[in-house]
Amino acid sequence: ARAGTTYIFRATMGTAVIEWGGIASAGTPTHFVARNGTSFTFKAGVMPGAGDIPTLRVADSLENPVPGVNVRLTAKKNGTQIATGVVPADSIGLLAIYRTPFTVAGTYTILVESVDVTPAIPSLTYTIVIEPAAAAKLAFTQFPTSVVSGQTVSPAIVVTIQDQYGNTVTAPAANVNLENDPTTGVTMSGTGSVSPVNGVATFSGITFTTST
């Protein structure tokens, strides 16, 4: 019988009748069921809607949900382990895989394994790609260095377009402009307006010349 099904046994002999009943419970957990797939793409820092959260169900051989099973989640980013822990499936055998929004862009895998289940449930792996959020700020990723007046700044000055979490935003963007403060008495020469490539604006050939 399916778990949760009420069943009744009845024995009769002539006019004598005896009954006994109960409710079927789930059997031994045998597998994980990925409720809405195993591959997802989210924006950094954004928690998806309830219907889009990666969720699995622990089930027995008849597909009945099995509650309370301990599950180990091991998260890796670009192949390097970043976290692991054990959490139980809820009262209806469900477990949310993506529990806190990631803020660092990259490719994550989450390995799902059973704990204290014999035989062990075959593992399941989720892949979650985190994309940068909207562009929010600029950052010098190669600062201007001290240079002799009139000589080219080396290495070249680099400005990167970032989201609020510091991820490089690679989407097409307007030119990035570089200028110096004229009150310092220093004149900047070279191309001061650069089209970023994959979110990175590189200012090559920049020179600074003092007025004295």
Image (cartoon, rainbow, N blue to C red):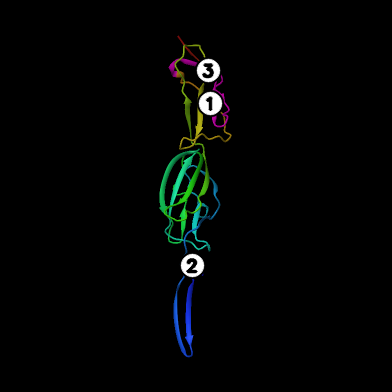
Query: Tag 2's secondary structure?
Result: loop
Which numbered disc flags the more N-terminal residue, 2 or 3? 2
Q: Position of residue 125 (x, y in %)?
A: 52, 47
Dot 3, how many residues are within 10 Å of its Cα: few (below 14), some (14-19), or many (20+)?
Answer: some
Amino acid type for the residue under numbered disc 3? Ile
Amino acid type for the residue under numbered disc 1? Asn
Identify the residue under disc 3.
206
Asked if disc 2 and disc 3 are in contact, CB closer than 8 Å, the reply is no
Dot 1, how many residues are within 10 Å of its Cα: few (below 14), some (14-19), or many (20+)?
Answer: few
Disc 3 versus disc 1: nearer the observer:
3
Disc 2 versus disc 3: nearer the observer:
2
Q: Which residues are magenta?
A: 183-204
Identify the residue under disc 2.
3
- Residue 200 part of the magenta-drawn span: yes
Dot 2, how many residues are within 10 Å of its Cα: few (below 14), some (14-19), or many (20+)?
Answer: some
Query: Residue 177 got which mark?
Result: 1
Residue sitting at x 48%, y 85%: 12
**Position above or below: 90 against 169:** below
Q: Position of residue 75 (x, y in %)?
A: 46, 44
Query: Tag 1's secondary structure?
Result: strand
**CA distance separating discs 3 and 1:** 12 Å
Q: Position of residue 195 (x, y in %)?
A: 58, 28
Residue sitting at x 46%, y 86%: 17
